[in-house]
Amino acid sequence: MKKDFMFTSESVTEGHPDKLCDKISDAIVDRFLLQDPYTRIITECAVSTGIVFIAARFEPNVNVDFTNIARKVIDKVGYDQADFNGKTCSILTSLKELPQSNVCGFDERNLSETEIEQIPVRNQVTVFGFACNQTPTLMPLPIWLAHKLARQLTAVKRQKNLTYLSPDGKTQVGVEYKNRKPYRIHSITVIASQNSFTEPNFEQLNDDIRDMVIKPVFLNEEIKPDKNTKIFIDFNEPFNVGGPSIHSGLTGRKNAIDTYGEYSRHSGAALSGKDPTRIDRIGAYVARYAAKNIVAANLADECEIQLSYSIGYSRPISIQVETFGTGKIADEKITQILEKHFDFRFAAIIKQFNLRFLPSLRKNGFYEKLATYGHVGRTDISLPWELTDKVGIF
C-alpha cells in the first residue's frame, strides 16, 4: 500500500451539462414522489445546443409535466443566453408507462421483520461506501476541496459578484500525501466559463478567481496553498464559453464527483434519476452510512465497504471491508460487526432512511439537491446516511 503519493479530484458546478441533466432527472423523481411516494420512476436526460431530451419509464398513477420541470431547472441554474435557455430550448420526450405492479407497492413503515426479509431486490449491483478521517465530514480531502471551490464559483455568480460568469464551471484539487495523510496542496485548477468571448480579459479573470473563489475556500482550511502550489485558471482557454452549446451532457456521467472523487471505488451505476426502489442508488447510501460509522467510532482511519446485491435476495450476498492497513481491529471483525448491527436489506434501507417520503418532508424537494456537489459528505443538507448514530454500539 502506497504511503506517499499525490491525488487529484474534480468537481463541477450545477451548470455543467452533465450535472444539469442530473438535476433535471432528480427534479422529476422529486415531483413523482411528491404526488405518490410509492410510484416507480426511472428517468435520464441529455442536453446539447438548444435541445433537451428526456427518456423516462414510470407507473401511470401520477400527472407530471416533464417539459415544465426541465424548463424550471434550466432557469434556476441560470442559463439565459440565446443559444440555450429555459424558454426557447426544444424539449423532446420519450415516455413509457410501466405496468402496474405490487412488487414495490409495500408500505415499509408497517412491515414486520419477516416481511422485510421476503422482499427481494429487483436488479443486481455492486456498490461501495467510503469514509476517512481527512475532513470533518469524513470525506477525502481532494473531493471535499473541489466541491467547496465549485460551490464558491456558483455563489459568486448567483450573488452577482462576477456577473460575467456562465453557470458552467469545473474545479480540481491535487493533494500531496505523506504516510497516507494529507500534507500539502499540490495544485488548484478552476475552469470558469464566461458569458461571452470578449470579457473579461485574462488578467481580470485570474485576479477575480483568486480573490473571490480560491482565497475564501481555503480561509479556514488547515492545509492551505503554499508558494509552490500550482494554480491554473482557464489554462489554455482564457475565453471559455461553456454550457450545452459547447459540450453535451448526460445523466449519470459524473459518478466519481457524486461520491469520493475516485479516492475510493464507486459503482458504475448512476445515482440520479431513480426512485428509492432502485438498490443501485440506495445501496450506495447505506454503504456510506456503514463506512462513516466505522471511521467515526475510530475502528479505522479509512474504510471502504463493498455490498453485492443479486436479484431475488433481500440482503447483499457479499459484504467486504477494506481498511487499507488503518484498522484498529481486523477487517474480518469489522465485517462481523456490520452483519450484526447494520441492516442492509432492501426494504430495511428504505424504511430506515424514510427514502420515499423525503421529497414531501423537505422544502423544495430533496433528490434534486443531491444532484450537485455530491450525494455523500454533505453539510448543507441533513442526510440520514450521514448520521453517526451507530458509534455507541461498538
Image (cartoon, helix red, strand yellow):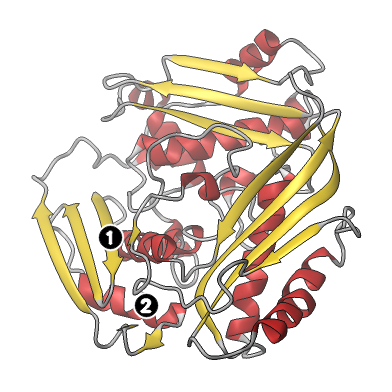
- In the image, residue 341 sits, relative to residue 138, either above or below, namely above
Residue 214 horizontal/vertical position (percent)? 76, 69
Say what secondary structure mark 1 lies in: strand
Location of the C terminus (image quadrant)? top right
Distance between mark 2 and mark 1 Cα atoms = 12 Å
What residue is shown with label 2?
Answer: 74
Residue 130 horizontal/vertical position (percent)? 62, 34
Q: Quadrant of residue 44?
A: bottom left
Say what secondary structure mark 2 lies in: helix
Q: Is residue 9 visible?
A: yes
Q: Residue at x 46, y 14 (%)?
A: 318
Packing grade of label 2 (10 A; few <14, some 14-19, many >=20) is: many
Packing grade of label 1 (10 A; few <14, some 14-19, many >=20) is: many
Residue 10 horizontal/vertical position (percent)? 60, 53
Residue 306 horizontal/vertical position (percent)? 53, 23
- In depth, the one of 33 and 135 nearer the eye is 135
What residue is shown with label 1?
Answer: 45
